Amino acid sequence: MFFNQWQQIDFNNIAKRLEGVTRDEVRRTLNSSRIDDMLPLFSPAAAEFLEEMAVRAAATTKERFGNTIQLYAPLYLSNECGNSCLYCGFSGKNRDITRRTLSTDEIEREVEAIYNMGIQHLLLVCGEAPAKVPISYLKEAIHIAAKRMAYIAIEIYPTDVDSYRELVEAGVDGLTVYQETYNATRYAELHPAGRKRDMPWRLDTPDRGALAGVRTLGVGALLGLDNPYADAYMAAYHARYLMKTYWRSQVTISFPRMRYAEGCVVTPVEVTDRTFVQFITAARIAMPDVGIVVSTRERASLRDNLAGLGVTQMSAASVTEPGGYTDRDISTAQFQVEDSRSVEEFAAMLTQKGFEPVVKDWDHDLH
Ligand code: SF4
């Protein structure tokens, strides 16, 4: 399990190593055809190689994935949460937010609205409130979504192998879980209460999903909570571990940057656009087959330029509050989105740039 590997790594030591990487080390890494040690590509010293990295990442992406970008949308089922993550609008400590859990009729309406937008890849999202959002509720939501959606992923509270197995049997294809930060000390500060305090349990979540038969495993770190270079590298290290250990599963990685949310009390460490692009290109060069996901957290102009640079999946026309596709109420949202274009507008931009927006690339009959 990943926790065993992570225990042998000192986060501060990784941060120090990244700081000490030289130009020559980056050059040597970029010159090798097989990259065993990807750390130099995530270092501050790699910034001056960004153009070269972008060219190589673009070529590798084209070779492995063609000119395709898969589109998906998140569906927030509930904003109830018993955790108190200091960077999140859904924190149980945030009294200013209206709490809402969708009924089965509301889920049906939201799924229909997303389908009518032209999306068939769905990400079901909820906070950590298993008493209000139990596995039985999630199974029902998956059954409803499966009537319209070709691919269903979940971003829910970490659970055990048996529960994941039930969700897979109900129709789940993918599991996403962000570690937020891989630094144990910072993790403890940011999660003062609730089940999320258990860092080893969260670190092993993708392993449990894989053991339950989840087909796609997604990891990432929320950049801005700690040293972004070390967190981005650790997320890539985690992704590579999963690719090696569960070679039958597809693995994706994402580098979400912190966004303002009502109730958030963390001042994020700045991650510039160039550094963000560096991490995406580094991940592509070091792991040619990894899926790379970029959400509507990023602004439209940047997302337009990221197509082709390594990204394989992008969300479109997302809302981050429960019920938001049929009844907008941003006072219940998790965070503000930056790219609010419609699916049609976003797909038109991709087509104009020579990419094929893919709304469906899987069918359950293929199982
Ligand atoms: S990040 Fe997730 S677990 Fe933490 S408060 Fe927000 S919804 Fe809850």
Image (cartoon, rainbow, N blue to C red):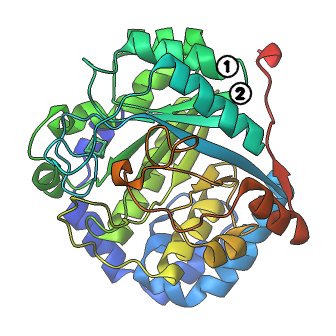
Residue indicated by mark 2: 149
Q: CA distance from mark 1 to mark 2?
A: 5 Å
**Which quadrant contains ligand 1?**
top left
Question: Is residue 331 shown left or right of residue 293?
Answer: left
Residue drawn at x 24%, y 58% as measured from the top left: 87
User: Which mark, residue 256?
Assistant: none
Q: Residue furthest front?
A: 327
Residue 243 vertical position relative to residue 17 in the rendered view, above or below: above
Mark 1 is surrounded, within 10 Å at the Cα level, by few (under 14), some (14 to 19) or many (20 or more) other residues, namely: some
SS category of the residue bearing label 2: loop
Q: Position of residue 24 (x, y in %)?
A: 51, 86
| Residue 173 is at least partly visible in this image | no
Q: Amino acid at mark 1?
A: Ala
The amino acid beneath tag 2 is Met
At 51% from the left and 80% from the top, the residue drawn is 273
Figure quadrant of the N terminus: top left
- Per the image, the residue denoted by label 1 is 146
Residue at 42% over, 76% down: 43
Left or right: 295 as drawn, with respect to 86: right
From the viewer's side, name the closer residue of 228 and 289: 228
Specify the quadrant that holds the C terminus: top right
Say which element carries label 1.
helix
Q: Are marks 1 and 2 in contact (CB under 8 Å)?
A: yes
Of 305 and 236, nearer the camera is 305
The x, y position of residue 253, in whole percent, is 53, 51
Q: Residue 311: which quarter of the image?
A: bottom right
- Taking the image as shown, residue 360 lies to the left or right of residue 166, namely right
